[in-house]
C-alpha cells in the first residue's frame, strides 16, 4: 500500500466583494445582525461577464497548487471536482477543467455532488485511490458560485453564502517524509434532506416559468435544524478519525472546519475541548462557499505561516444531504 499526502494547495476568489453594509441596501438586515449571528462580514461574488465561473476559478487555483507542488499539469492522473454549482449540466466540470489545464493524458474526471462536504469526500476518495495504486496524483477541487443559487430577496439565506474556490493535489508520497493521510471517514443521513435542499430544476421538477416567477428555484434551508445536526456531526467525526489513527484530540495542531457559521465552529470546538487558537476561521471574509471553504481556509493558513509541514491537521465538514466527512493527516 502506498502512502498519500497533500502535495500542494491553491485558491481563487472573484474580485467583487459584497459587504454586509452592501446587503443593507438590498434587504431588511444589518451588519450587526449578520456578524453577531454568523461571524460573516463580507463575501466575494463571481462576475457574470465570464472569467470567474467555477472551472475558471479552479483553473487559477490549480496553477497555484501545481507551482506549490512543483508539478506539471500532465502529472495529474485524476480530477475530482466537488461543486453544487457546476458550469453546466453536461459535460462535468472536471472534464472542462482538464481541457482548460491542457491535460492530454486522458485522466479520469469526476464531479462530486456532496454539497459542503464535497471537498472532504474528494480528499478521502483520492486517498483511497492512491493507497491502492489506482491513481498517483489527484487534483481535488471545491469550487462554487452560490451567488447564482440564492434568492437575493430572502434575508434568511442570501446573507450566508459566497463564491470561491480551493484546491489540493493529493499524491503518492515518494519523498520518504512524515506527511501522510492517516485516517478518514465519510457518511450521510438522507433523512435530513429537507433541512437544506434545492428541489426545483432537476428531473423531478424541471424549471417552468411559474417556478421561476414564484422564486421557488433557489436553495431552501432550515437554519436551526442544520445548526444542531452540524455541531453534533462535526464533533462526532473529529473524535472518530482521531480514534482511528490512535491520536489524542489534544495532539491535533489545527482543525480546519467547514465555514458555515462561526457559532457552529465555536460550539464544535467547545464540544471537542479544542481552543479556538487551533481552529482556522476565515468565514468573516468569504462567508459559506460550500465545498470551497475547507481548502480555502487550509490554503490561507499555510500561506500566512500558521500551518506548517509536519503539523497534524483535521478537516471536518458537513452539508446538504446531509453529508459529512473528516480527514486526519500529517501535512
Ligand atoms: C441561519 C442562521 C444564521 C439564523 O440564525 P438564528 O439565530 O437561528 O436566527 P432565527 O432564524 O431564529 O431568526 C431570528 C430572527 O431574525 C430574523 N432574521 C432572519 N434573517 C435575518 C437577517 N438576515 N437580518 C435580520 N434579521 C433576520 C428572523 O426573521 C427572526 O425574526 P423573528 O424572531 O421576528 O421571526 C442560523 O440558524 C444558522 O447559521 N444556521 C446554520 C446554517 C447552516 O449550517 N447552513 C448549512 C450550511 S452547510
Image (spheres, helix red, strand yellow):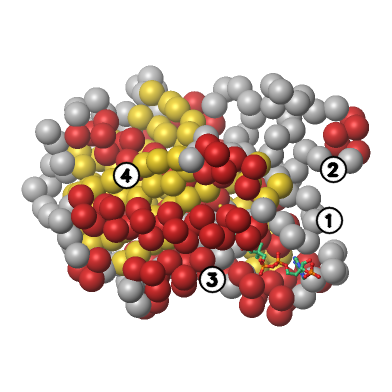
The image shows residue 105 at horizontal and vertical percentages of 35, 22
Q: Verify CB contact (< 8 Å) between mark 2 and mark 1.
A: yes
Q: Quadrant of ligand 1?
A: bottom right
Dot 1 crowding, Cα within 10 Å, few <14, some 14–19, many 20+: few
User: In terms of sequence position, does the residue under pointer 3 or pointer 4 come before the other?
Assistant: 4
Q: Which mark is residue 153?
A: 1
The image shows residue 225 at horizontal and vertical percentages of 60, 56
Please state if 85 lies on the left or on the right of 140 as rendered: right
Residue placed at 26% from the left, 52% from the top? Answer: 241
Please state if 260 lies on the left or on the right of 37 as rendered: left
The image shows residue 289 at horizontal and vertical percentages of 57, 54
Cα gap from disc 4 to disc 2, whole angstroms: 37 Å
Q: Which residue is mark 2?
A: 215
In the rendered image, the vertical position of residue 122 relative to residue 257, given as above or below: above
Cα gap from disc 1 to disc 3, whole angstroms: 24 Å
Residue placed at 33% from the left, 57% from the top? Answer: 238
Q: Which mark is residue 185?
A: 4
Q: Is mark 3 within 8 Å of ligand 1?
A: yes
User: In terms of sequence position, does the residue under pointer 4 or pointer 1 come before the other?
Assistant: 1
Amino acid at each position: 500500500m502506498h502512502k498519500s499526502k497533500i502535495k500542494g494547495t491553491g485558491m481563487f476568489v472573484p474580485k467583487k466583494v459584497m459587504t454586509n453594509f452592501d446587503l443593507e441596501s438590498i434587504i431588511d438586515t444589518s451588519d450587526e445582525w449578520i456578524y453577531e449571528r454568523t461571524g460573516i462580514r463580507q463575501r466575494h461574488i463571481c462576475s457574470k461577464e465570464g472569467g470567474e465561473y467555477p472551472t475558471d476559478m479552479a483553473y487559477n487555483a490549480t496553477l497555484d497548487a501545481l507551482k506549490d507542488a512543483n508539478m506539471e499539469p500532465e502529472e495529474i492522473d485524476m480530477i475530482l471536482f466537488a461543486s453544487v454549482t457546476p458550469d453546466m449540466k453536461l459535460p462535468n466540470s472536471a472534464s472542462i477543467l482538464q481541457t482548460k489545464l491542457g491535460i492530454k493524458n486522458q485522466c479520469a474526471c469526476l464531479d462530486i455532488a456532496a454539497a459542503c462536504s464535497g471537498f472532504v469526500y474528494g480528499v478521502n476518495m483520492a486517498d483511497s485511490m492512491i493507497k491502492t495504486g489506482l491513481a498517483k496524483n489527484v487534483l481535488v477541487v471545491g469550487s462554487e458560485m452560490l451567488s447564482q443559487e440564492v434568492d437575493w430577496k430572502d434575508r434568511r439565506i442570501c446573507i450566508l453564502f459566497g463564491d470561491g474556490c480551493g484546491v489540493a493535489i493529493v499524491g503518492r508520497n515518494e519523498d520518504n517524509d512524515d506527511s501522510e493521510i492517516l485516517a478518514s471517514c465519510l457518511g450521510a443521513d438522507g433523512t435530513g434532506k429537507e433541512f437544506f435542499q434545492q428541489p426545483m430544476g432537476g428531473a423531478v421538477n424541471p424549471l417552468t416559468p411559474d417556478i421561476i416567477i414564484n422564486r421557488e428555484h433557489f436553495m431552501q434551508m432550515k437554519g436551526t435544524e442544520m445548526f444542531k445536526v452540524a455541531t453534533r456531526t462535526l464533533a462526532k467525526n473529529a473524535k472518530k478519525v482521531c480514534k482511528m489513527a490512535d491520536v489524542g484530540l489534544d495532539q491535533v495542531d489545527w482543525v480546519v472546519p467547514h465555514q458555515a457559521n462561526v457559532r457552529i465552529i465555536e460550539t464544535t470546538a467547545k464540544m471537542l475541548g479544542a481552543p479556538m487558537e487551533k481552529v482556522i476561521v476565515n468565514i468573516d471574509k468569504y462567508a459559506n462557499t460550500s465545498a470551497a471553504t475547507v481548502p480555502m481556509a487550509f490554503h490561507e493558513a499555510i500561506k500566512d505561516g500558521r500551518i506548517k509541514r509536519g503539523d497534524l491537521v483535521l478537516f471536518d465538514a458537513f452539508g446538504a444531504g446531509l453529508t459529512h466527512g473528516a480527514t486526519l493527516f500529517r501535512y
